[in-house]
Image (cartoon, rainbow, N blue to C red):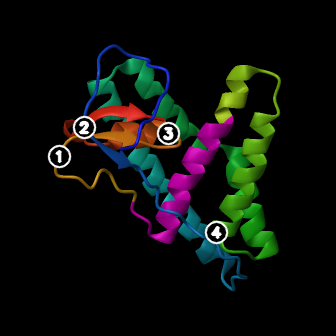
Amino acid sequence: MITIQGKGVSTGVGIGQLYYYHRATTEVKTYEVEDVEAEWQRFKDAQATAIEQLGVIAEKTRVEVGEDEAFLFETHQMLAEDPDYEESIEGIIKEERLNAETALSRTAEVFAEMFANMDDEYMRGRAADVKDVSKRILDILCGVVQGGIDSEVPVIVAADDLAPSETIQLDKSKILGFIT
């Protein structure tokens, strides 16, 4: 038997099977591209898909949770098409002739670090948003499909951390509680 202790953030007791949430991992391989315009378009297509997905998540959040919470995903949409973010990715693709996955990963790392080093606590929190948005686009580029809960019965979900976009997409009928 496994015992996990933590600090409760809501009332009640959850009893059930423990389900460890696993994210699909994406290994980024760096390679040089011949057709930089086609590679830039490949990024733009993945970016557009991510923005569309975030819009669906925002609407679902608005209905299930509320307007204030939905704003987070609308912010993610804006971040995905931030001019500085795009410019960095485009520069790496077109000037260094590197693949979109590498350009995106390098840009995400720089932007997340920049936010993490800011004095303002709210802005430091945006580092996680950069990582979440970038992971979504990277998964699209790599053809990775993020899964939900592979269980026939309701479970207690255990994860090192869950991004808001991961949490809202989980099938609530299969969740008894969360441990993060």
- Helix, strand or loop at disc 2? loop
- Helix, strand or loop at disc 3? loop
Disc number lying in front (3 or 2): 2
Disc number lying in front (2 or 4): 2
Range of residues picked out in magenta: 127-145
Picture residue at 29% right of the left edge, 50% below the top: 149
Disc number lying in front (1 or 3): 1
Determine whether label 4 and label 3 are within 8 Å by CB. no
- Crowding around mark 4 (Cα neighbors within 10 Å: few <14, some 14 to 19, many 20+) is many
Q: CA distance from mark 1 to mark 4?
A: 39 Å
Residue 3: image location, x then y, percent: 42, 37
**Residue 128 seen in the current view:** yes
41 or 176: nearer the viewer:
176
Q: Is residue 133 left or right of residue 51?
A: right
Q: CA distance from mark 3 to mark 2?
A: 23 Å
Q: CA distance from mark 2 to mark 4?
A: 42 Å
